[in-house]
Image (tube, grey):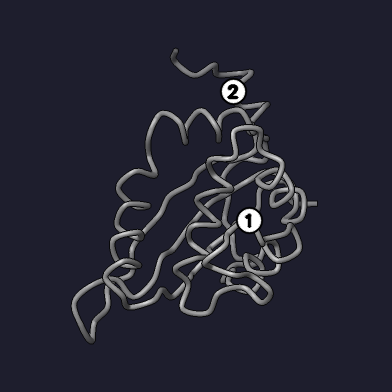
């Protein structure tokens, strides 16, 4: 079984000033010490990034891409985010759902507390553009194996 797997989450967003600002803020503040600490603590994410897809028909952002490579299967990955102790990355995904052009079925964007794990995971799976076979990876080691062999700089 392949240990490293991809997520390429593409979410078209509302074309409102508020949604545009939220997407820009998600992008701008994604790569920060808190996100890094949360992802490091999970010890399954190899790489993670956010990209904004420009709207070629008008000014602004058409959608948000969240691109990650992770250890394990998709279900364990999504469960790890759902159960993340700090909740920061989970909150970012829920924020993305609130500005989605097509929000998850059963989710009330005006009340993000209505999201359940099932709604969350179905939303991610429905918007994922990648399959495990799509990913080239140069090494089979897990994040834990790599950080044990090559401790990150403190």
Looking at the image, which residue sits at the far bottom? 57
Give whichever of 79, 112 is nearer the camera: 112
Return the mark for residue 147. Answer: 2
| Quarter-of-image position of residue 147 | top right
Task: Classify the position of the C terminus by image quarter.
Answer: top left
Looking at the image, which residue sits at the far left? 59
In this rendering, is residue 68 above or below 64?
above
Describe the element under mark 2 as helix, strand or loop. Answer: helix
Q: How crowded is mark 2: few (under 14 residues within 10 Å), some or many (20 or more)?
A: few
Give whichever of 31, 116 is nearer the camera: 116
Do the residues bearing badges 2 and 1 touch, measured as CB atoms within 8 Å?
no
In this rendering, is residue 49 above or below 9?
above
Return the mark for residue 5. Answer: none
Name the residue beneath numbered marker 1. Answer: 113
Residue at image point 48% right, 61% down: 96
Describe the element under mark 1 as helix, strand or loop. Answer: helix
Is residue 1 shown left or right of residue 154?
right
Residue at image point 33% right, 63% down: 52
* Mark 2 / mark 1, whichever is N-terminal: 1
């Amino acid at each position: 079984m392949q240990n490293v797997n991809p997520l390429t989450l593409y979410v078209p967003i509302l074309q409102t000033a508020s949604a545009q600002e939220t997407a820009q803020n998600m992008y701008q503040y994604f790569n920060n010490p808190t996100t890094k600490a949360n992802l490091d603590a999970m010890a399954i994410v190899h790489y993670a990034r956010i990209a904004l897809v420009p709207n070629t028909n008008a000014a602004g952002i058409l959608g948000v891409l969240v691109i990650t490579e992770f250890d394990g299967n998709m279900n364990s990955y999504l469960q790890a985010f759902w159960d993340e102790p700090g909740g920061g990355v989970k909150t970012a995904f829920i924020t993305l759902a609130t500005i989605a052009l097509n929000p998850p079925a059963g989710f009330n964007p005006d009340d993000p507390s209505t999201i359940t794990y099932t709604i969350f995971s179905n939303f991610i799976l429905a918007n994922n553009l990648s399959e495990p076979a799509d990913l080239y990876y140069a090494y089979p080691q897990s994040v834990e194996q790599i950080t044990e062999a090559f401790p990150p700089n403190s």
